[in-house]
């Protein structure tokens, strides 16, 4: 039992380390991640400045984090595609464009949530 717990804690620590390394690598090379982080921080400040319900605030914060997650996935797709080949291929373009579209859709979801909350 103790060895299983120790192994799981080690696995959790490794996962946290690798996730942090991924964040730092993306932060260092991806301007769009830095931009979305700024937008997310401003959105969070606004969410805590306004008189919102806890659920509304939670939705805004969660959608902001999803935008960051989508941006990280998009960065991973772009990196993998670029690693596989430097040749121009319509499938590579499609993969990159779809990753970008995922970021746009999550950002739109956050925008829609803001509009509904502020109008409602």
Image: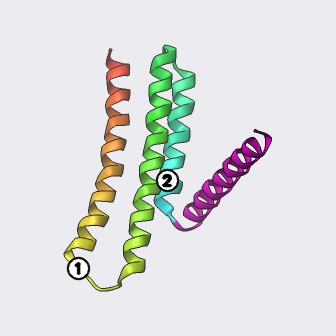
Taking the spot 38% from the left edge, 35% from the top edge, the residue there is 110
Residue 40 in the image: state x and y as whole percent: 51, 41
Question: Which residue is situated farthest in the left direction here?
Answer: 90
Q: Give the range drawn in magenta.
A: 1-29
Q: Can residue 93 be seen in this view?
A: yes
Residue topped by disc 1: 89
Front residue of this view, candidates 87 and 38: 87
Residue 30 in the image: state x and y as whole percent: 50, 64
Q: Can residue 51 be seen in this view?
A: no
Q: Is mark 1 on a helix, strand or loop?
A: loop
Circle on res. 51: none
Q: How crowded is mark 2: few (under 14 residues within 10 Å), some or many (20 or more)?
A: few
Front residue of this view, candidates 33 and 89: 89
- The residue mark sitting in front, 2 or 1, is 1
Residue topped by disc 2: 35
C-alpha separation, residue under disc 2 versus residue under disc 1: 28 Å
User: Position of 96 compared to 45: left or right?
Assistant: left
User: Position of 112 compared to 4: left or right?
Assistant: left
**Do the residues bearing badges 2 and 1 touch, measured as CB atoms within 8 Å?**
no
């Amino acid at each position: 039992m103790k060895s299983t717990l120790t192994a799981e804690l080690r696995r959790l620590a490794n996962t946290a380390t690798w996730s942090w390394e991924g964040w730092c690598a993306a932060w260092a090379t991806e301007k769009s991640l830095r931009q979305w982080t700024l937008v997310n921080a401003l959105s969070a400040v606004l969410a805590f400045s306004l008189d919102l319900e806890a659920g509304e605030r939670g939705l805004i914060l969660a959608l902001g984090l999803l935008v960051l997650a989508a941006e990280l996935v998009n960065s991973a797709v772009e990196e993998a595609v670029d690693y596989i080949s430097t040749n121009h291929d319509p499938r590579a373009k499609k993969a990159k464009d779809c990753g970008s579209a995922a970021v746009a859709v999550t950002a739109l979801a956050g925008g829609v949530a803001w509009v509904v909350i502020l109008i409602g």
